Amino acid sequence: MKDWGVSPRRLVPPMQGAPLWGWLGPVLVAVFGGILRFVRLGEPRSIVFDETYYIKDAYSLLTFGVERTTLGDAKNPIADRRIMTGDLDIWQHCPNPADCAAFVAHPPLGKWMIGAGEWLFGMTPFGWRFAAAVVGTLSILVLARVARRMTRSTMLGCLAGLLLALDGLHLVLSRTALLDIFLMFWVLAGFACLVADRDWARGRLAARYESSPLTSYGPRLGLRPWRVAAGVCLGAACAVKWSGIFFLVAFALMSFAWDMGARRAAGLREPYKGAFSLDLPAASAALGLAPALTFLASWGSWFAHDGGYGRDWERATSSGPLFFVVDSVRSWLKYQMQVLGFHTELDAYHEYMSEPWTWPVLFRPVTFHYVGGRAGCGASACSEAVIGAGTPALWFAAWLALLWLVVRYSAARDWRAGAVLLAVAAGWLPWFYYAIADNRTMYLFYMIPVVPFMVLGLTLVAGLVLGREDARPARRAVGAAAVGALALVVLIDFWWLSPVLTGELLTQAQWWARMLTRSWVEVAPK
């Protein structure tokens, strides 16, 4: 028997509870969240906020394979009006299709996902919001499962899924055809795959250590399918929005740190050298090459059609038998540089914009939809609003929990706390640079990829409050009461806020009562 230094059982702690409930519980929570997201999904029956860009880009991808310009502009939205009447003749007509190519600032994958709903259900509000509701619902299931794996508790996993289902910002973006909900989904899916890979790799390390020749580095672990899947998911995140790169870099470093920690926990004499020589090459392929290929593949339709924006920039300078490949790649790279310039120079004022340091306190949400002065609510004046704001009770509790996780990680080096804090930092702190250096235009809903990790952090602290399973019954009862009270407060707060998250018709007084601060009122269209 080899000397591990610690029990191999410590590498992969056993899961608590029955496997059946490990799936059934999260699925039931996801069904609950799905009901919230799909009921009245077609309301408001209008094009809200930035849906005006993405639904038309998605429909253009379905129709032409690339994005094309539409009739009208922001001051005269001819295409929007025609869409709402069922008239889909919305394209500008050009003798040369390349002259109608539209410059788009984001990669195409998220728009293809929106387009899937339009293909299934038509160019209607339900159709273009369908995919967002699907991935919003699936993200609840994914978070519940990954929280269960990290805490080894089905109950805490279900709690995490429930809290995400009750977040207002997550609900609004799950019911709106914007790209950010798809970015959130692929980031969360990539993280979940890496957590599964951590368990898988540690289990493989424990099994192979006993049967492999004794070395100071430890055994090779072979192909790691979960890490390859993580690379594909994180590449897909980048293929929705470029900001997915922040998570890709952070999670790649995190996964390699876990490799070093696993070999050290196994009692190997040179765990770090073993990780660099045995784990790093495969990790570079899984979390470097796989994301790059996924991102490139998302542009496949742009490469296949001549009508894409900038598709023939380099055609005049290309020659020889491989001119098509050379032309395509050079044009694509030039396009990417132009998009990068657009994002770094985006500093136009918008009444809904906000600074990243104000996001945790929900200072200035985005009003996606507002119609005032309508009748039909039993009062002289009514309001119909969709406000993209998180559930305050959940957000404030989550940020307090994250502060506690900083203390816990500093004291105990809890890998779970470190992973959550890293994910929050990757999704939030880069925006500080853009706010300070570039004065970039930003919005509260840029935080949506961070929301699942805020919930995960709150769940970890809830597990500490509950206490260990072998704790005294009185201690467990007090902890359960505290966690249950928190969940109840979040539920009540969400219920109170939900009419202005889903566009229900309210009296002006009812609408006003749900505005957390005056800054919420100021973002309502005049």
Image (cartoon, grey):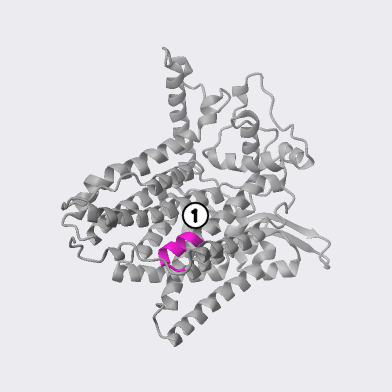
453 or 16, which is in the foreground? 16
Report x, y in % for residue 134: 61, 51
128 or 16, which is in the foreground? 16
Which amino acid, mark 1?
Answer: Pro
Residue 363 is at least partly visible in this image: no
What's drawn in magenta, residue-wise? 144-153
In terms of secondary structure, where does tag 1 sit? Answer: loop
Prevailing secondary structure of the magenta residues? helix
List the residue tagged with mark 1.
Answer: 449
Residue at 68 percent of width and 59 percent of height: 502
Whether residue 482 appears in magenta in the rendering, the answer is no
Residue furthest bottom in the image: 474
Residue at 62 percent of width and 52 percent of height: 133
Q: Quadrant of the N terminus?
A: bottom left
Left or right, 155 with respect to 413, comes to: right
Residue 124 is at least partly visible in this image: yes
Q: Decide: few, some or many residues near mark 1? Use Cα within 10 Å; few <14, some 14-19, many ≥20.
A: many
The part of the image, by quadrant, that contains residue 149 is bottom left
Left or right, 148 with respect to 79, comes to: left
